[in-house]
Image (cartoon, rainbow, N blue to C red):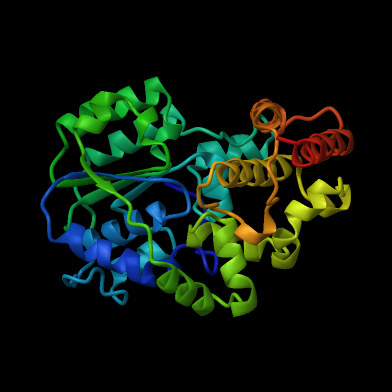
Amino acid sequence: MARGGGRRAGQGVDRMTASWIAAQTRALLAQRGHAWLLQGPSGLGQFDLALALVRAWLCDAPTPEGACGRCPSCHGIDVHTHADLVVLMPETQMLALGWPLPEKAQAEIDDKKRKPSKDIRVDAMRDAIERAQRTSARGRGQAMLVFPAERMNHVTANALLKTLEEPPGDMRFVLASEAAHQLLPTIRSRCLAHTMVWPAEADALAWLAGQGVPATEAEVLLRAAGGRPAEALAAHQAKMDARQWALLPRAMSQGDVGAFKDVPLPEVVSRLQKLCHDVIAAQQGAAPRFFAPEALPGRPLSMRALTGWWKQLQQAARTAEHPLNTGLATEFLVSSAREALNSRG
C-alpha cells in the first residue's frame, strides 16, 4: 500500500482542460487497445494525456469526452489513492508531483538509507505487476501509467514486457515518453503509438492565460519553451523573467554574467544551448525557435566559432549537475558565449 496521498494544487488536473489534450483524449478513447505509447518532446502534456486516459478507463460514468470528474473513482485518482491505478515514475518525480511512494521505499528514504531514485526501480515494477494479478477492487479493471517510460532500465523494462504480452484480466497500460527511441523495441512493438500533437500558438497562449500567465509574458515564455506550453508554464512558476530572456542574446554578446544571477548551472547550460541553436539557425537563413529574430546578431558570424561553442555546451551539459564551482563554470560559459557571438564570419 502506498503511503500518503493528496494532490498538490495545479499538478496535472488543470492541464487536462487544455484544448489539445482534450481533443487527443477523445480520439484515443474512441480506439481499441490495451496498451498505448504516448511519444513526443517534453512539454507537450504526455503525463496529462496519460492521466486523462486512465481516469476515463476507470471512471464510473465515462463519456466519449473522458472521465466524469465527479464519481468516487475520479476522486480516488485526484487524491492519489485509487486501488486499481498503478503509477510508476522515478521516485524523485513521484515526490515532486505529490504521488505517494510505497511504504518500504518511503521508509528507506526517510531513514536516509538511500536517496530517491531518478529511475523507475525494478522493485516498484515487480510490485506493480504482482498487484496487477489481483481482482479489480472497483470492478472496472485496472490501469498502469508509466512516465517517463524511458526511465526504465533494461531489467525494469523486461519485467514489464511479459505483462504487456500477456496482460492479466482487463489490465490496460499507458506508457508516456519524452524519448521513445530509448525504449526497448519489444516494448514499443507491443503498444499502439500516438505522437503528441503540437498546440497552435493561439491555443497555447489562451491556455497560459487561463493558468494565470500575464499576456505580456506568455508569448515570450512560450517562445523560450520552443512552443511547448507546459514548459512555458513551468518557467512562469519558476519566476523566469520574460524581459531578461528577450535580452539574453545582447547580454551574452556583452559577457554579462549577471543575466544568470541565481540560475542553477544546468539551466544556464540549457538557456545557452537554446541561444546557440537559434544563432546557428539564423546564420543559415532558418527561422529561430526560442528567440525573436530581431534579438539575434544580424551580421555574419564564424560558423567554426559557433559549432565549437555548441560542442562545448554539449560537454558542459554532461557535468552541469555536479560542477566543481558553479560561479566559475557560469563565468566560463558566458565568456565562451561572448567570444562566439562577437566572432566574424
Residue 151 visible at all? yes
User: Farthest residue toward the top?
Assistant: 155
* Figure quadrant of residue 242: bottom right
Depth check: give the residue in front, 136 or 173: 173
Depth check: give the residue in front, 255 or 115: 255
Q: In which quadrant of the rendered image does the C terminus lie?
A: top right
Q: Residue 206, percent across and down?
A: 46, 77
* Figure quadrant of residue 31: bottom left
Up-down: is 81 above or below 277?
below
Q: Residue 12, percent across and down?
A: 45, 63
Up-down: is 315 above or below 106?
above
Q: Residue 71, percent across and down?
A: 28, 74
Residue at (31%, 61%) from the top-left corner? 52
Q: Is residue 171 left or right of residue 97?
A: left
Depth check: give the residue in front, 239 or 85: 239
* Figure quadrant of residue 179: top left
Residue at (21%, 46%) from the top-left corner? 172
Q: Is residue 274 left or right of residue 211?
A: right
User: Farthest residue toward the left?
Assistant: 32
Residue 82 visible at all? no
Q: Give the total of numbered labels.
A: 0
Q: Residue 181, percent across and down?
A: 36, 31
Q: Is residue 152 left or right of residue 106?
A: left
